[in-house]
Image: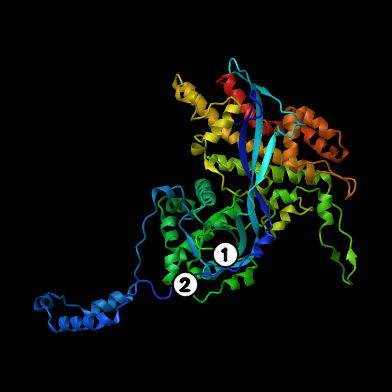
């Protein structure tokens, strides 16, 4: 809380959005040196004065053997020893702890080896996040202490409605490719061998970045395990056998041994088959999330005394990784996000490289598809896919908490992942929408207990699980109603953020500016939030009138007006998702369903 006078206070609610950027400044860095040990660790160094005494004592002990010990020595059967040497042996590994039981696919314990399992292709960019704070103001009666909400003065710089701070680039992104037997099987099945890698450069016990990596891994492991269980229950053929293997921990046991088996040249056939099976399932059913496959273990790179750090820079153009970094491996969906697609299609078309004819002459680009086809692709493809992403996460009792345009990847079922964001893309069946960047996600049971979440609930009159009202509930029915309201409010925050993503996508991608240089009204997240919440006071009808008065959006407004303004009704439900949960709780009508 903060105050500008003795009677004017403000409450704050904060959420986070992932952002991406091309970190070109990473190349400019000081030369990195690594410390090498002078000799092998554990060597015994004997001084010259004591070496002769040591050798003489050893020789005297050898001349006086213990007869009783010689009689107790066992007899060895050489033939039995030779047979045992011919058999393969395995090194026992500890079983996964109870914390990894949410992961049935082995992605939390699987480690790939650089070179044997996959190769790094190139550096793709970097990721950061924006910390967005929404401010709500109120006045306090000095006599009664009662608070009264008030509207902030939009012309007063000391009363901002929203502030934003950037973290900078904290996660590096690389492209890679599976090699060896696994890569060969993927190619033979017609699957993509490319992978995406995120490097969380954790150093000096950076708790924030370490928590980002852990929460992303934990949430994705739970999400894809839950999704695969549902897939096995509805699929035919050998899906029941696959479900039994997942639930019996077979995938986890095999995945845990992958890195050690690679060091001992033991085949990783079973784990390869499990990875191929999972990628086939997620690809054929277009799973609405990025699949996490495991981690990249760089111990071989760090332990190589002949490795020159400059070789990494020459190959990838960025500084080498530091020990302690966490490398997470995902399946590849390209790098085209909803943010890159949120540009008028006529502008996207102008930026395409020109095509040339047989004699080098430039061929004029074909016209854009009709607006009806583009609108269908946006509504039934992009926007429906985004809702499916969030619904899948909520079905697994996960909330994303950083939904934004950069969180959605618009990919394709083909090899060219940029096909989904082409200005000529109109085939919904070839589009695949996936939700990424799960670092701020939480299990819903954990999220409703957080203090910050309780503060956001109070702003809408919904008691949180840690509130005084919940602890002193008079009956089980009342506590259950509070619990339901808190859970639904957590989901409503994702839907509220998704509503602004919809709004931005519709009125940028489908906008029809008169010329390429014609100015387009601002459609960034902060502007849309200010328009809807402050200027139009959360009135969807007034928001529609605002867009209807601009010629550049006339076709979009007509699209949303179809079927008795069904499009505007959907936008209103998303933008006002938190208010709907609040109204349901305050009305106290048990017959109404908050779902």
Q: Is residue 427 visible?
A: no
Alpha-carbon span between mark 2 and mark 1: 39 Å
Coloration of the structure image? rainbow
Q: Residue at x 67, y 52 (%)?
A: 20
Q: Which residue is mark 1?
A: 186
Q: Is residue 309 visible?
A: yes
Q: Measured from the top left, where is residue 32 in percent x and y?
A: 57, 68
Of tags 2 and 1, the one toward the viewer is: 2
Q: Residue at x 45, y 66 (%)?
A: 268
The answer to whether 369 appears left or right of 70 in the picture is right
Can you tell which mark lies on residue 275?
A: none
Give the secondary structure at mark 2: loop
Q: Is residue 3 above or below residue 215?
A: above
Q: Nearer the viewer, residue 272 or 579?
A: 579
Mark sitting earlier along the chain (2/1): 2
Give the secondary structure at mark 1: helix
Q: Residue at x 53, y 26 (%)?
A: 463
Task: Classify mark 1: residues with Cα within 10 Å, few (<14), some (14-19) or many (20+).
Answer: many
The answer to whether 278 appears left or right of 54 in the picture is right
Q: Measured from the top left, where is residue 356 in percent x and y?
A: 86, 67
Q: Quadrant of the N terminus?
A: top right
Q: Nearer the viewer, residue 583 or 52?
A: 52
Residue occupying the far left of the picture: 68
Give yes or no for contact between labels 2 and 1 (Cβ–Cβ under 8 Å): no
Q: Nearer the viewer, residue 171 or 6?
A: 6
Location of residue 461 (image quadrant): top right
Location of residue 331 (image quadrant): bottom right
Q: Measured from the top left, where is residue 27 in percent x and y?
A: 66, 65
Q: Measured from the top left, where is residue 334 in percent x and y?
A: 66, 57
Residue occupying the far front of the picture: 49
Q: Which residue is mark 2?
A: 36
Q: Is residue 37 above or below residue 460?
A: below
């Amino acid at each position: 809380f903060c105050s500008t006078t003795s009677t004017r206070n403000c409450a704050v609610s904060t959420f986070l959005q992932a952002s991406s950027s091309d970190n070109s400044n990473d190349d400019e860095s000081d030369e990195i040196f690594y410390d090498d040990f002078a000799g092998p660790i554990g060597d015994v160094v004997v001084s010259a004065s004591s070496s002769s005494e040591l050798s003489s004592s050893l020789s005297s002990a050898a001349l006086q053997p213990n007869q009783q010990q010689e009689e107790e020595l066992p007899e060895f059967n050489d033939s039995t020893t030779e047979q045992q040497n011919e058999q393969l042996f395995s090194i026992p590994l500890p079983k996964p702890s109870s914390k990894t039981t949410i992961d049935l696919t082995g992605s939390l314990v699987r480690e790939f080896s650089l070179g044997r399992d996959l190769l790094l292709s190139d550096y793709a960019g970097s990721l950061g996040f924006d910390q967005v704070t929404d401010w709500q103001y109120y006045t306090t009666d000095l006599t009664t202490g009662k608070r009264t909400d008030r509207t902030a003065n939009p012309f007063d710089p000391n009363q901002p409605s929203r502030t934003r701070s950037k973290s900078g680039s904290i996660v590096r992104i690389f492209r890679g490719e599976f090699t060896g037997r696994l890569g060969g099987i993927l190619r033979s099945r017609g699957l993509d061998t490319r992978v995406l890698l995120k490097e969380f450069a954790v150093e000096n016990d950076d708790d924030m970045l370490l928590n980002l990596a852990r929460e992303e891994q934990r949430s994705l492991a739970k999400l894809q395990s839950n999704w695969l269980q549902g897939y096995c229950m509805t699929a035919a053929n050998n899906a029941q056998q696959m479900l039994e293997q997942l639930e019996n921990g077979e995938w986890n046991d095999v995945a845990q041994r992958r890195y050690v088996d690679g060091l001992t040249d033991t085949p990783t056939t079973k784990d390869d088959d499990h990875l191929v099976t999972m990628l086939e399932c997620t690809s054929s059913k277009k799973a609405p999330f990025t699949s996490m496959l495991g981690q990249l273990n760089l111990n071989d790179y760090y332990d190589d005394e002949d490795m020159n750090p400059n070789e990494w820079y020459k190959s990838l153009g960025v500084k080498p990784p530091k020990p302690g970094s966490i490398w997470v491996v995902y399946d590849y969906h390209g790098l085209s996000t909803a943010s890159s697609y949120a540009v008028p299609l006529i502008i996207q078309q102008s930026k395409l490289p020109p095509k040339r004819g047989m004699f080098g002459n430039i061929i004029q680009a074909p016209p854009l598809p009709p607006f009806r086809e583009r609108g269908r692709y946006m509504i039934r493809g992009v926007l429906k896919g985004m809702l499916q992403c969030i619904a899948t996460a909520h079905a697994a009792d996960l909330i994303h908490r950083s939904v934004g345009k950069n969180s959605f990847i618009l990919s394709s079922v083909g090899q060219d992942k940029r096909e989904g964001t082409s200005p000529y893309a109109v085939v919904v069946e070839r589009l695949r929408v996936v939700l990424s960047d799960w670092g701020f996600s939480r299990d819903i049971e954990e999220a409703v207990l957080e203090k910050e979440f309780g503060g956001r609930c109070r702003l809408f009159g919904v008691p949180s699980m840690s509130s005084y009202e919940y602890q002193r509930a008079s009956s089980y029915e009342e506590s259950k109603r509070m619990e339901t309201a808190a859970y639904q409010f957590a989901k409503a925050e994702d839907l509220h953020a998704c509503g602004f993503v919809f709004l931005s996508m519709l009125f940028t991608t489908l906008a029809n500016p008169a010329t390429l240089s014609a100015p387009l009204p601002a459609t960034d997240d902060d502007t849309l939030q200010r328009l809807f919440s402050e200027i139009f006071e959360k009135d969807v009808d007034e928001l529609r009138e605002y867009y209807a008065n601009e010629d550049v959006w006339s076709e979009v407004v007509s699209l949303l007006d179809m079927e008795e303004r069904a499009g505007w009704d959907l936008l209103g439900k998303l933008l006002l998702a938190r208010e709907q949960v609040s109204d349901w709780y305050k009305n106290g009508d048990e017959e109404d369903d908050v779902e």
